[in-house]
Amino acid sequence: MEQILSRTNTSETATLGSKIYSVTESNPVADNNYYKTLCNKNTKLTNTLVEEMDRQKLDSSLLIYDEERDDAISLIFNEVEVKMAWPDSVIRASAEVINEILTRYGRSIINLPYNDESGKLSSLYEELSTPDLVSHIDNIPGFSMLIDNLNRSIKNFKEREEQLTKDKITYKDRAPASQIAKELKHFLNNIFIPYIDVMGRSDSTTFSNIQNLLSQIITDSNNSVRRRLKSNPDNSTSQL
């Protein structure tokens, strides 16, 4: 059986570990505790790797929530700008009152660091929610919906940020995904695969099918890695 290529990246390693799990789960071996132990080891490492990869994706998801609140405040600026040129004098006057508040913050608020933007958006929302502005907001059709939309985006960002902070505390001692992938590959190459090869020769009745399935999975994975590296040689520098 082939060894797993060293340049198999984190995502490819997770996929490979999952496929190996599927094979071993579908081919249980009775009265072989060592085999079960090795299978459990693969399962544990693979699950941990997938969890860490998912957690890292959540880290990047904060950008999506930031973009949502940027869009929400931009809609408010755009609406007020349009309504200040509106033919109806009542709508126009109310838009000008609201614009005085917006001008103090400026559109560049969306370019501030997360914490600064969060503070200013919350302050802006509070100002737009004061009783003195109710009549002006009501004078602009649909404007209250834009303010509600801003409030939702502020809350969604805050909730996501708080969840990520909790996750960082919970998983602070966990190795990064790249390190877990490296550990999984080392285990498979140096312990799991050699054992399957030995058992394939000594107990072919039980292990021959397992060995063949795993061999094909690893060969396919290695070929896929080779194609990736061949199509993008520069990418090889970031591989494990």
Image (cartoon, rainbow, N blue to C red):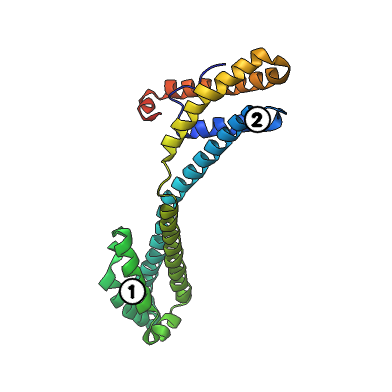
> Disc 2 marks which amino acid?
Asn
- Quarter of the figure with residue 9: top left
Between 111 and 136, the one nearer to me in the picture: 111
Whether residue 40 appears in this view of the structure is: yes
Identify the element where label 1 is drawn: helix
Residue 173, position as x, y percentages in the image: 41, 47
Residue 145, position as x, y percentages in the image: 48, 73
Mark count: 2
- Residue count near mark 1 (Cα–Cα under 10 Å), binned few <14, some 14–19, many ≥20: few
Q: Which is more foreground, mark 2 or mark 1?
A: 2
Between 138 and 23, the one nearer to me in the picture: 23
What is the CA distance from the residue labelled 2 to the residue labelled 1?
A: 62 Å
Which residue is painted at 32% across and 78% down in the image?
96
Identify the element where label 2 is drawn: helix
Residue 184, position as x, y percentages in the image: 49, 31
Q: Where is mark 1, residue-wise?
A: 123
Q: Is residue 228 above or below residue 58?
A: above
- Quarter of the figure with residue 105: bottom left
Which residue is painted at 44% across and 65% down in the image?
153
Q: Is residue 46 above or below residue 35?
A: below
> Disc 1 marks which amino acid?
Ser
Q: Where is mark 2, residue-wise?
A: 33
